[in-house]
Amino acid sequence: MSAQPSSSRGQDWAAFVVCLFFVLGCFNLIDGLAALVQDDYFRADELLFGDLAMWGALYLVVGALQLLAAWLIYRANDFGPALGAILALLNAVVALMSLGAYPIWSVMILVLDGLVIYALIVHGTGRATA
């Protein structure tokens, strides 16, 4: 048997997801701003489709929604884990589509999104249930 109750482990995972989503959201906001402001930051010829302005706007929207999801999960809102899992999946798809432009970063994002999806699906908000 584990020395730590399962609700405490769930709360630990929820805290991990909040921190990770906050970091991912900030990184996506920075990436979006960099794509919009500094064209030479990314290799635009390696993008799957679209231009840097479209990708910059997409990253800004995803980053803002990830910050919202982090706040909802922190507040133990019932909608938070569902929104978080959907956003992590969307972020993983976006990372896959931008794999050619920055491969190492995309692989790191895929791993982190996988951890977020696991934590949200298995543990949710980490609240104890009666």
Image: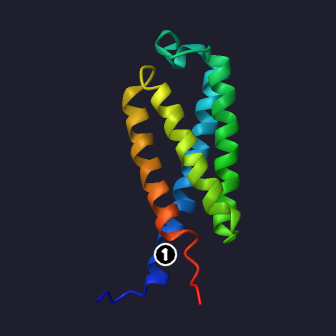
**Quadrant including the N terminus:** bottom left
Q: Is residue 100 left or right of residue 36?
A: left
Q: What element does badge 1 sit on?
A: helix
In the foreground, 127 or 71: 127
* Coloration of the structure image: rainbow
**Label 1, residues with CA under 10 Å away: few <14, some 14-19, many ≥20:** many
Considering every residue shown, the one lying at the far left of the view is 1
Q: Residue at x 61, y 62 (%)?
A: 81
In the foreground, 89 or 72: 89
Indicate the quadrant where residue 39 lies: top right
**Quadrant including the C terminus:** bottom right
Q: Is residue 48 left or right of residue 127?
A: left
Q: Residue at x 59, y 79 (%)?
A: 127
Q: Is residue 103 above or below residue 49?
A: below
Considering every residue shown, the one lying at the far top of the view is 45
Dot 1 corresponds to which residue? 10
Q: Is residue 23 left or right of residue 33?
A: left
Q: Is residue 68 above or below residue 126?
A: above
Q: Residue at x 38, y 27 (%)?
A: 103
Q: Is residue 84 above or below residue 30?
A: below
Percent x, y of residue 60: 68, 35
Indicate the quadrant where residue 106 lies: top left
Count of marks, rendered view: 1
Q: Residue at x 69, y 46 (%)?
A: 65
Percent x, y of residue 34: 61, 26
Percent x, y of residue 16: 49, 64
Percent x, y of residue 45: 49, 9
Q: Amino acid at mark 1?
A: Gly
